[in-house]
Amino acid sequence: MTSRAQRIYLTEQSAGSIIRNTFQLYFRHFWSFLLIVLSTVAVPNVVAVHALKNEDYGLYVGALAAAFLMGIPAGLAIVVLVSDVCRGNPVDTIGALRRGYAWSTPKLLVIYLVMTLAPFTIGLPLLLVRKWRSFMAWFMFAAIVRVIERASVGESFRRSRHLGEGFYWRNLGLVMLTFLVATVPIYLVTGVLQMTVTIMKSANDNLGADIFVGSAGVVGSPLYAIAPILLYYEMRVRKEAFDHTLLTEELAI
């Protein structure tokens, strides 16, 4: 017997459904996502904001590197949490964080580095060639496949390419649209609040503003991770014709 969550998420979805479910899932489990980002990427983000304001570029670069590294367990914890929601399991935020840290291995670091750097170094030029149009589809689901299917690094990229192939522009467009919808309001609000707090305080007494802005800047970041996870499940249902029960049994993380 399938749960309501499985009927919603473990099925073929339209573009509008993916976007709507991304935001609904985020707001329904807001406190869980907030705990994940505050316990991982918030501190280095605050340090980066403070360092940039004080023109300490060495500290700024170090904070960005720390934020990237802490983003790995955060991202993995979000994969676990969203997967539990999709499969109709109880949400265990602490358990998701624990597994996120446990699975943050050098192999996951390799996948995240490739996902981050390759599209800008070789992916964009290759997109100009028609036959390489699906190139970036290799990267979209790689970390998700690694966690959920326990695949090797190479197999994670192969599976990611297979799942995204034929739906490259749709999937990339949905992720980018989610990114824009989530980012613009966040930066508008935090920018206004930062200016307000700075005006109310002296130039040397605005550490509180840095903490607030740095923390607020990561509150919406789970939205960027939720959409690809929902797309991963949707691609598996669409391309591999799995039903709710079989997909739930095979995706045991």
Image: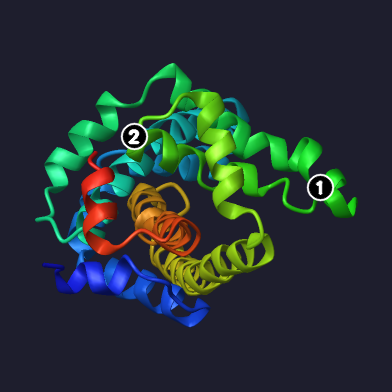
Counting residues from the start of the chain, the first of labels 1 and 2 encountered is 2
Return the residue at label 2: 73
Residue 222, visible in the rendered structure: yes
Residue 41 appears in the picture as rendered:
no
**Rendered image: mark on residue 132:** 1
Name the side, left or right, on which 244 lies relative to 178: left
Toward the right, the furthest residue is: 129
Q: Amino acid at mark 1?
A: Trp
Q: Is residue 84 left or right of residue 195?
A: left
Question: What percent of the width, then of the height, locates residue 154?
Answer: 56, 25
Q: Which residue appears at 48% of the width and 59% of the height? A: 235
In x, y percent, where is residue 239?
50, 59
Sort mark 2 into few (<14), some (14-19) or many (20+) by Cα contacts within 10 Å. many
Disc 2 residue type (three-letter)? Pro
**Which quadrant: the C terminus?**
top left
Q: Is residue 202 above or below residue 53?
A: below
Query: For the residues marked 1 and 2, what is the alpha-carbon distance in whole angstroms?
Result: 31 Å
Q: What colouring method underlies this structural image?
A: rainbow
Q: Is residue 92 above or below residue 166?
A: above
Q: Judge depth for marks 1 and 2 and give the one in front.
A: 1
Q: Nearer the viewer, residue 94 or 168?
A: 168
Q: Residues within 10 Å of mark 1 (few under 14, many from 20)?
A: some
> Who's the residue at 15% across and 68% down the image?
2
Q: Is residue 133 left or right of residue 178?
A: right
Q: Camera-side residue: 195 or 18?
A: 18
Q: Residue at x 38, y 69 (%)?
A: 22
- Looking at the image, residue 244 sits to the left or right of residue 171; the answer is left
